[in-house]
């Protein structure tokens, strides 16, 4: 590889202010070279080399994501996305715009020199840009992880001056560019804090010091042990009950008779059961995500035991809407979604195979089996006429697509049902896939949407499956769906 510096290009003319700044930059470089940096010799050169090609930051992202918390995974992904944008900017614009030679190594002790000297131009520092981009990206999503990463990023940036491969101004410019890249990524993909639901309407909920009066029921099948240990540290006086999936309803009902507040740890189906019991007994609900998707908890901006622990201690709570459905003698509530058509069939097929071949293979097999039938799983009567539908989706509050992020809710008390349908017709499976690929806001003729507070469907065939928050039941004849505005009080850490 040849150097980026073209020595045939004539030097620019003299400029008093620029010359003073360059002289100051060189003097600061010499001071850094002459200064004794305690304990730096065995650390900084190795740290600088480890950051070549972003290796250090990919390893750091893997370590952060390995903690298996949703916020940590998002922080790692945001850090890498910021690093990628910073690297692209540096390599395409930065180093080609200001073709500054590297500093001379004469003042730098030989023991600090890198074994392989870089041959690209000096301004700005790519290592500093990557370090600042990764640390800033992580911090924007998770300030606590940002505090862990920041000292390493600072050390990498300083190592470039210590080893003599960059002037101080190169490092400062690179760090500024890297931080700017992280904020650029945030403009494209908002952080969870930016897109979280508004802290209203606030609700009165008991502030339970150390959790006394809170009874938390955990679904053991959701792998909730680690989360329950964190919650116990946060709320040592709370009563924690772990049970098998078949015992969840009974344990929640017993807990409601002796609790000032009801807690639950599990997936969306378990949370749905807890919400049903909490509504019946007029209790505030504390939700600790413990399943695979945890849609309600994440849309509520509740991610771990520390956040919900603080909310319970301080009595921080909001009121949220609840959806309710009824069909003959069957009724229930939903916090996330209700659907008729292909999705309930997918759920049933998945449950039939998941215990034999695993969750993800069962998901794929269910999709193949349902789509292969290429038939209309739902017939709905509207204004006296029967219409074939491939899918009817009802969301509790409006689901949005924000920038490049997937659909989620930004207001859990908007009083609306978000109704989406994929119409029947020729080749319904192909129409469904086309609508799904185009996204929920598509104007595809196979897709339609509306916002209502109440929905009534008639002409439902006996045995038609209805899915709500991951659970499935059979309905027939007439199905009514309505909103219960601000019906449920839930603990939520407020800004």
Image (cartoon, rainbow, N blue to C red):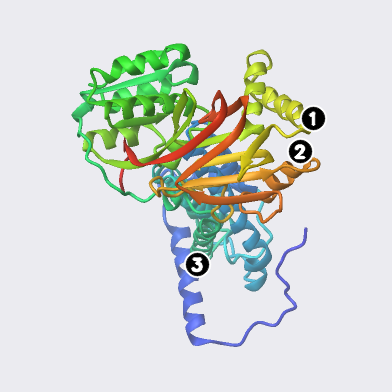
Q: Nearer the viewer, mark 3 or mark 2?
A: 2
Secondary structure beneath dot 2 equals helix
- Residue 49 relative to residue 238: left or right: right
Residue 372 circle label: 1
Question: For this rendering, which residue is in front, 224 or 317?
Answer: 317
Q: Quadrant of residue 103?
A: bottom right
Give the mark, 1 or 2, whose residue is nearer the N terminus. Answer: 1
Q: Residue 493 vs residue 244: left or right?
A: left
Q: Which mark is residue 429?
A: 2
Report which residue position mark 3 lands on. 169
Which residue of the protein is positioned furthest toward the front in this rendering?
A: 384
> Can residue 102 be seen at all in this image of the molecule?
yes
Asked whether the viewer can see residue 60, the reply is: no
Q: Where's residue 197, x and y in %?
A: 40, 48
Q: Are marks 1 and 2 in contact (CB under 8 Å)?
A: yes
- Label 1 vs label 3, nearer the camera: 1
Query: Badge 2: how crowded within 10 Å, few (<14), some, or many (20+)?
Result: many
């Amino acid at each position: 590889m040849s150097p980026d510096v073209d020595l045939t290009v004539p030097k620019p003319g003299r400029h008093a202010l620029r010359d003073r700044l360059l002289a100051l930059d060189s003097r600061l470089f010499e001071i850094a070279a002459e200064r004794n940096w305690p304990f730096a010799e065995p650390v900084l050169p190795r740290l600088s080399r480890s950051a070549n090609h972003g290796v250090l930051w990919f390893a750091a992202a893997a370590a952060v994501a390995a903690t298996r918390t949703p916020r940590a995974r998002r922080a790692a992904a945001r850090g890498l996305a910021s690093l990628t944008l910073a690297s692209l900017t540096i390599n395409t614009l930065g180093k080609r715009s200001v073709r500054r030679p590297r500093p001379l190594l004469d003042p730098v002790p030989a023991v600090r020199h890198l074994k392989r000297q870089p041959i690209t131009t000096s301004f700005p520092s790519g290592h500093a840009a990557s370090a600042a981009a990764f640390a800033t990206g992580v911090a924007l999503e998770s300030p606590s992880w940002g505090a862990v990463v920041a000292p390493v990023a600072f050390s990498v940036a300083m190592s470039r001056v210590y080893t003599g491969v960059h002037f101080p101004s190169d490092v400062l410019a690179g760090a500024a560019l890297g931080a700017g890249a992280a904020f650029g990524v945030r403009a494209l993909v908002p952080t969870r804090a930016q897109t979280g639901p508004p802290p209203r309407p606030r609700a009165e909920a008991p502030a339970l010091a150390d959790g006394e009066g809170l009874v938390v029921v955990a679904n053991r099948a959701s792998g909730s042990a680690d989360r329950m240990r964190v919650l116990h540290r946060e709320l040592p006086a709370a009563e924690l009950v772990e049970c098998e999936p078949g015992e969840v309803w009974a344990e929640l009902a017993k807990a409601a008779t002796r609790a000032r507040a009801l807690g639950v740890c599990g997936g969306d189906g378990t949370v749905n059961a807890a919400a049903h019991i909490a509504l019946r007994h007029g209790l505030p609900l504390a939700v600790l995500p413990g399943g695979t998707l945890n849609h309600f908890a994440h849309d509520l901006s509740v991610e771990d035991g520390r956040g919900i622990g603080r909310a319970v201690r301080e009595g921080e709570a909001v009121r949220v809407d609840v959806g309710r459905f009824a069909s003959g003698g069957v009724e229930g509530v939903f916090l996330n979604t209700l659907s008729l058509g292909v999705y309930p069939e997918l759920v049933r097929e998945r449950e039939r195979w998941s215990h034999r071949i695993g969750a993800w293979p069962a998901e794929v097999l269910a999709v193949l089996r349902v789509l292969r039938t290429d038939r209309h799983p739902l017939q709905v009567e509207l204004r006296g006429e029967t219409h074939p539908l491939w899918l009817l989706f009802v969301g509790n509050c409006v689901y949005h697509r924000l920038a490049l992020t997937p659909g989620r809710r930004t207001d859990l008390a908007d009083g609306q049902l978000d109704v989406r349908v994929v119409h029947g017709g020729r080749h319904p499976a192909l129409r469904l896939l086309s609508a799904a690929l185009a996204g929920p806001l598509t104007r595809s003729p196979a897709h339609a949407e509306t916002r209502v507070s109440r929905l009534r469907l008639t002409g439902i065939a006996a045995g038609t499956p209805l899915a709500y928050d991951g659970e499935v039941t059979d309905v027939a004849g007439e199905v009514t769906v309505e909103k219960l505005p601000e019906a449920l009080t839930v603990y939520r850490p407020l800004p």
